[in-house]
Image (spheres, rainbow, N blue to C red):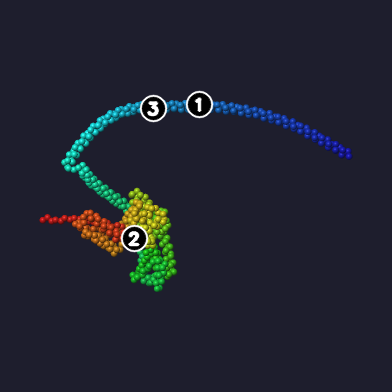
Amino acid sequence: MGLLNWLAVSSSSMIALAIVALLVGAAIAYGLSVGWAKSRARIARSRAEQLLNEAREKAESIVERAHIEAKEEALKLREEIEQEVAGTRAELKEAERRLAKREDNLEKKIDALSTQERSLQAQERQLQDRDKALSLKEKELAEIVSQQRDQLLKISGMSLEEARELLLSRLKHDVERESAAIVENAITAAKETAEEKSREIILTAIQRYAAEHTSDHTVSAVDIPSDDMKGRVIGREGRNIRAFEKATGVDVIVDDTPGVVVVSAFDPIRREVARISLERLIQDGRIHPARIEEIVEQVRKEVEKQVQELGKKASMEANVGGLHRKQIDLLGRLNFRTSYGQNVLRHSIEVAYLCQVMADELGLDGALARRCGLLHDIGKAVDHEVEGGHPQIGADICKRFNERPEVINAIAGHHGDVPATSPYTPLVAAADAISASRPGSRRESLERYIKRLEALEGIANQFPGVKQSYAIQAGREVRVIVDANRIDDKMAVKTARDIAQRIEKEMTYPGEIKVTLLREVRAVEYAR
């Protein structure tokens, strides 16, 4: 029990001691912290004072440097202003000098003008004196002329009106004769110049575009290797040939001519399809209605594709773009169309190039001229299907595809069917005639050729006063010899024109025909 009391007293004493120790420690710590804080404050104040002193020194140095820079800038501005003032003074002095010089010049000019004015006044007085003298002389001359006129009237016995009418009639006759001579000379010079210029342009065009001198011809005859193959083409009771004609739309002529079957059709595309199909059937050997339909359909697709390719190739060759697909198709069809043996597509390309060359020589649009030339015969692709001539058909087709008016007029008027409204129409007509009339471009059968020559000579021989006529240059010229006693020079010109108009009216021919009429007077005597 005592031990417990002692432990209790001891523990309370220890607690008290611990509390006292804590209080003493806290006091010491507080004192130390207060001292440390005061020490830090002193250090901070000294540091702040140091920073303030440094800031003041820097501010003073900045202000001093700013003052120095300001003084330097002021000095620079003062120097610049002084230089500008000096330059302005120099300019003012120069301007003053120029003004003084100009003033001197003006004074000299004023003096010169004053001198001229005095001279002009003197000349004016002289002219007035001359006018007075001339007026006096005119009055004297008028009196003299009046006296002479009265004397002439007395001598001639004519009145004044009669004399005036006689003089005017003579003057009128002289003026008419001189004007007629001037007009004749002008017309002759214009014709010579125009003929020379046109010949030069045409020769240049022909030389720059030298095409082949051969003509194409679409063959409608198919070779048959044997009579047995001809029988197979006909088929039992003609069923093969009927199926072939039905599938192709052409007429197949099988006669006694050995080794040949003739394909006849107005449509050149159908004829070409039929020709190729028949050749393939002969090569294949299997000829029956089903095979015929298969081959014909296959060839038709190939020909349609070929037509498109030919049209595109022609437009690219002629350098004509922007064509409608239908126009390209029609151009391709022209490859299978001939005119007097000449391939119409090649003819169109020739005309396009010739038109461009002539248009360039004349200062016109060469691209537009090429377009007119390429499309001028496009109506021939469908002229067997549509009523009317190929110029109007082609013009209607191109009008639907919004071609320019110059192109439409060139197509419609290249044969003179409609009046020309643009310079490209006569260009196309000339190029068309050049392409058609060049040697080797077209050919005719011998029988038709002879008939045309005979027709030319027959038309010329029907006119009164014609002694003989000869068709020369393959029918492109007819020479007519007339009786000089029955036809004079004026009638010779009229007769030649009448013959040409009669040929145009009654005959069909490619290009043009020249009519040359010869009138000759021969005087024959013998010296014995």
Name the amino acid type tagged 2: Ser
Task: Check residue 61 in the rendering and tell me which mark sits there, or answer none.
Answer: none
The residue that label 3 is drawn on is 99
Q: Nearer the viewer, residue 339 or 158?
A: 158
Image quadrant occupied by the N terminus: top right
Q: Is tag 2's residue or tag 3's residue first in the polypeptide sequence?
A: 3
What separation in Å lies between label 2 and label 3 (alpha carbons)? 88 Å
Task: Check residue 339 in the rendering and tell me which mark sits there, or answer none.
Answer: 2
Q: Could you tell me residue 23's position as x and y percent?
A: 78, 33
Residue at horizontal 31 percent and vertical 57 percent from the top: 511
Q: Nearer the viewer, residue 31 or 342?
A: 342
Q: Could you tell me residue 424's position as x and y percent?
A: 35, 52
Q: Nearer the viewer, residue 151 or 427?
A: 151
Q: Could you tell me residue 9's position as x and y percent?
A: 85, 36
Name the amino acid type tagged 3: Leu
Q: Is tag 1's residue or tag 2's residue first in the polypeptide sequence?
A: 1
The residue that label 1 is drawn on is 75
What separation in Å lies between label 1 and label 2 (alpha carbons)? 101 Å
Answer whether residue 346 is visible to the viewer in this image.
Answer: no
- Looking at the rendering, which quadrant does residue 520 occupy? bottom left
